[in-house]
Amino acid sequence: MSAPTLVDYDEVVERFDPVLGLEVHVELSTNTKMFCGCPTDFGAEPNTQVCPTCLGLPGSLPVINHAAVGSAIRIGLALNCTIAPWGRFARKNYFYPDMPKNFQTSQYDEPIAVNGYLDLELDDGSVVRVGIERAHMEEDTGKSLHVGGATGRIHGAEYSLLDYNRAGVPLIEIVTKPITGTGARAPEVARAYVTALRDLLRALDVSDVRMDQGSLRCDANVSLMPRGSSEFGTRTETKNVNSLRSVERAVRYEMTRQAAVLLAGGTVVQETRHFDEATGTTSPGRRKETAEDYRYFPEPDLAPIAPSDEWVEQLHSTLPEMPWEHRKRVKAEWGLSDEELRDLVNAGALELIEATVAAGAPSSEARSWWVSYLAQQANTRGIALDALPIRPADVARVIELVAAGELTNKLARQVVDGVLAGEGGPDEVVEQRGLKVVSDDGALIAAVDEALAAQPDVVEKIRGGKVQAAGAIVGAVMKATKGQADAKRVRELVLQRAARE
């Protein structure tokens, strides 16, 4: 039974307790696939990074990627999990066109990492602990492109194309324990969890965590139970949500949709659902399978995994400073408020500013450049801040040139524009565009005298005590020097030269 209308969100949280379960799939940034030597470069021509093994051809045999196992262990350790001393892969059997073997090699009852947690700090400073059920290794599927039709899905399409480049790419699936007790903040908690997990994985340098490219994808399980009940409701699983904002929107929508179904006397169907970015709604996918439907059995072609204590300890020693600890340190060192730090993180500017400071720039000026002018340039181009074609070292060099008096702020922006346009580094742009500040007093005096001679009425006003009139002369000199004069020095010379009899 479908609900004709949605229930107001306040009524939802007044009458129901939401229960969340988040499954995040992370593509590892290894050079080769999970069970073969094919490369994993994103964006290659379709079906050019395949071999008999990842295509599941008869007679081919898989070999476990050692680097992927190491990354999985590091992820488990960072999530406070117990690393299993022994485990093995299984075959997860189901048919779908993007599964060239008709089964997925995954871990079932013997995952690499179990029973961990991740603490989330919400915007108001409160902390929510999310339990981690497991983190297990598997391989990614290929990619389907459904051509024709209005939705981009298989229903209504004229035909489908299959690209198996992604088939076999190493995946880690991180599964939470049921998340309860969040009430009205359930959508916020879901977004905060995926955000914190993304930041952690980026710090570990195990994945590029590009949600827009599918290297980090979230499946959001949502169910509702009536207030006062202890029995979980029937859940739905919204698949492959690919942005932080969409995770929050998808959870919120499912809560209101399920509440409408239940309050209308209907029953929530256990199924997968698709999230529509344009409308912020979900739509039915397929009825959700159970573990029995997948007919798991141990993978006979792969040896068990038995990481030694020594290897696990060595991997533990490579863990970096955790992102939340790192932010607390930066906040103290830079003297930031909670709001300022949050703004830098949300803008994706924190790491860029740090790299600019590491290149020699003061933190305040590095922040100013990245969150103002460069953020504007990123917005204009419709790209992320870190996708701008300028390095932190370039920004630090521009700041250095301004501090040395070789550039004004206005000229500095022109230099940055040149770097963004691909004209080279800051020094090359300065040279090619002739943007250095005119610091020769002789040249400045000549330009000032010429401007004074052209506006004798302004000179009389200055001599009469109306020093604000000097702005007209300063403007004329700046125009004559194409903005390359130091305005402060020009003003000094204007007042000096105008005062002469």
Image (cartoon, grey):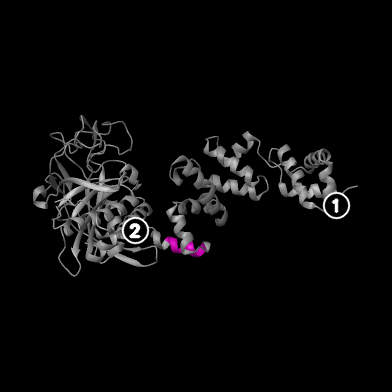
The image shows residue 60 at horizontal and vertical percentages of 16, 36
Instruction: Find residue 346 and report its image quarter.
Output: bottom left
Q: Is residue 268 left or right of residue 371?
A: left
The image shows residue 8 at horizontal and vertical percentages of 27, 58
Q: Earlier in the sequence, mark 1 or mark 2?
A: 2
Q: State the CA–CA distance, disc 1 to disc 2.
A: 64 Å
Residue sticking out furthest to the top: 158
Q: Give the extent of the magenta segment.
A: 326-333
The amino acid type found where label 2 is placed reads Ala
User: Residue at 55% across / 53% down in the picture?
Assistant: 368
Q: Main secondary structure of the magenta part?
A: helix
Query: Is disc 2 surrounded by few (<14), some (14 to 19) or many (20+) residues within 10 Å?
Result: many
Query: Is disc 1 surrounded by few (<14), some (14 to 19) or many (20+) residues within 10 Å?
Result: few
- Is residue 213 visible from the viewing direction of this image? yes
Instruction: Return the residue nearer the eye: 272 or 50.
Output: 272
User: Residue at 18% across / 45% down in the picture?
Assistant: 285
